[in-house]
Every structure is written in structure tokens, then in C-alpha cells.
Amino acid sequence: MLDQSRIARLCSLVILLSLATAAWSDTMTGVSSKASQGSNDSVLWSQLGADGTAISASVNATSGTRVAVHIGFAGPNSLASAVCAASPTCSWSGTGFTAGDRIIWTSNAVAGGNGPVTLSFGKSVSGAGALIQADEPGQFVAQIQAFNGSTLLGSFSVTSASGNAVYIGILDQTGPNITSVTFGLTACGSADANCVLSDFGLDTVFLNVPSGSAPAVTLTPTSLNFGDVALGVTSAAKTVTLKNTGSAALTITKIAITGTNSSDFHETATTCAASLAAGATCTIGVDFKPAATGARSAAISITDNAAGSPQHVPVNGVGTTAKLAPASLGFGSVHVGTTSAAKTITLTNIGTTALTISAISISGTNPGDFLQTHTCGKSLAAGASCTISVKFKPTAKGARSAAVSVTDNAAGSPQKVPLSGTGA
């Protein structure tokens, strides 16, 4: 048999699915990824308010296809929280969620827990699932239960091999018999004996809703994060795919960038026309040009004739005064053990005060395959530049990657330039 400890080290997550004995349990299937669930609807927590909004013990929401959803907690003062980037400026900094996602955090005003969380649906569904993460460090066990009225249809659990968020979902193979689901933890925080089982973060809940005649919109990905971009510099474009998952044509009235820092994000090449046939897809391109330092956010807003219109895709980025150019370096194919010619990255302080540099290093998957030297000192005056010279010396065949990482006092630190090459 394989050494289980080695498996745990090699895999970021070990997913264990178990079926609890319950009525109708032979018709229920547990899933451990959104892709496996094949959802066609979702409940976005952004509708409950901005980051840090306190939630009552009972609150109503609506899915993208206008299914009424009632959410119940053990008590008041849970939070609708935004997931933070590496330098937290918002309510939740859990590992495994996507920065900028809106989640429900079931911590109450005295740091206790308000879980489990129960979602009751105005229309029966055939499945539900979401990413979940314990607030305590270490391994945890998450559970989802599906009900038809008061009858338990099935119960599944997922065990994480670390403290990262895991996806847990449930499907009824016989059709839309699920009237409510409950998300919770049965074990948490092996690193902390005092963990609170009912304190966890719950990301977007995805649903399997019976199709109608509901056009319906699915957006992939559900958020865009542009990372660090220097002031006044336009990032590379990122793309959102819009799919009409309904059975009737989708009429698109308007696509716009809305929200707090809407002028920092710009719609680029878009293939979406005024009408989108059932089953068809189109794309929306967006880039980021920050006008100020720090976290910047907005949303892609799509107005159409589908339920839940306008649909929103949160977009986020960080404006910084530490400009790194180019945005990435590729070294192509180099023989193993051979050192490539150097390529140069220029670091420019585009701010109005001196930039304090703490460290410049190589980080990432294969840091030992890339070498760096630089002309940058401990401080870089406003408007000044220095250079970072990088070489590639592959230690093995195949694709190799890392990043130049600059740690400083500018927003978004550490700033990074991805490095890539192939060992031949």
C-alpha cells in the first residue's frame, strides 16, 4: 500500500466523501468540485451588502434565475465579507477562496459562531454546493445535508488535508426534490483544540435548478483579479465568458462597468451582440488602469432579459507606484545545466516619495532554476529606476516557472514578474 503521509504531502487536498444513512440516500450523490456539480444558477452574497455588513439571523436573497432563497443562521451578526488579497484590507483572508469574492462569514459579534447555515428554496432544486473553509487553522471536516421538507435526503462530508477551502456539494439523481440544504462543520482546526465548529466562511452557493423556457445566464469566471498594476499603466486584458444556459434566446440590452472605481476598469474586445442563442457563448474583455494606489474595485454589469438581470462580475486590482517592466519574462528552451543570456526587468518608482526596498528575490514553483542580480539599493528616489538582471539555468527538463518578487513599501507589495522557460 502507498504511504498515506506521502500522499498527504504530495496532494494539496485529500477529499473524502461519505454518505450518511438517510431516507432516499441511494439517489443522492456527493460532489467535490463545481465542475462535477454542473450547476446552472448561483446565489451571490454581494446582494446582502458591502464588505463587513452585519447579517440578521434570518435574511432573504434571490438566485440568478430568480429562485427565492431564505438563509437562516444560529444568531445575528454574521458578516457579508470580501475575501482579501495578500495584504488584507477586508474582512476575510482565508486561503483557497478567490480574492474579491464575497462570502458569508458566520462569526458573531463576540467571536462565536453562527453556523450551520441553512438555505431554503422557493422552488425545489436538484443540487447545491459551495466552497467552505473553517475559520480556525488546520484540517477540518465540512458537511452538507439536503432535505425535502423535514425529510433528510442525504448527507455528505469532505475532509481537507489542510486549512484550505474545499468544495462540497450534493445532487439528487432523481430530479428537483431538494427544498433546503444545510452547510456546516463536524470537525475543525486540528491545530487549535478550542476551535468553534460553527465559525466558517461560505462562498457563492451554486444551484441545479430545473430548466425552463429561465433564458439563463452563466458567467465564467465569477470574478476577475488583476493583481498589482502601476499607476497609469494599462494591464493585459482578462476575459469573462457569458453563456446562455437557458432554452430561449438571450436579449442583451447593455454591458457596462459599474461600481466604486468603475473608471479604472475598461471594456475591451467584446463578442456579445444584442442577441445570444440558447446554448451559445460570447466573451467580454476588461483591462485595468489604476488611477490611485491601493485596492480598486468595480463590476461588469450585464443587463438582459434573463432572471437576475443585471448580472454582475466583480473586478479587482491594486494600484501601485512600483512599476515593473516588462510584465513577464520568457526564456524559451535552454539545455539543462546551461545558463541563458540575461534578460532585464526595470523597476521604476513612479510615486512622489522614495521607495523603500526590503528585498528582491526569486519565488514560485522552480526558484532554483532562475538567477537574479540587481542594481537596486535599499531606497529608490521618486522618478528613479534600477534594473534586475535574470538568467535561466534549468535543473530539469520540461516547463519551469518562478517569479521575481520585489518587497517594498508601495501598495501591492510584493510586486511580481512571472518567469518561464523550458528545460531541454
Image: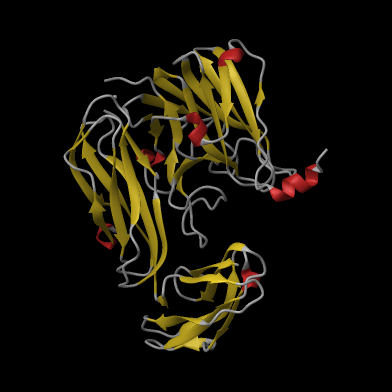
The residue shown at (44%, 82%) is: 346
Q: Quadrant of residue 139?
A: top right
Residue 369: x and y, percent? 63, 71
Q: In the figure, is residue 144 to the left or right of 318?
A: right
Residue 37: x and y, percent? 49, 30
Q: Nearer the viewer, residue 158 or 136?
A: 158
Q: Nearer the viewer, residue 275 or 152?
A: 275
- Up-down: is 89 above or below 71? below
The number of discs equals 0
- Up-down: is 400 above or below 32? below
The residue shown at (39%, 60%) is: 317
Q: In the figure, is residue 87 to the left or right of 140?
A: left
The residue shown at (30%, 72%) is: 232
**Residue 1 seen in render:** yes
Q: Quadrant of the C terminus?
A: bottom right
Residue 374: x and y, percent? 54, 86
Q: Quadrant of residue 47?
A: top left
**Residue 192 seen in render:** no
Q: Quadrant of residue 254?
A: top left
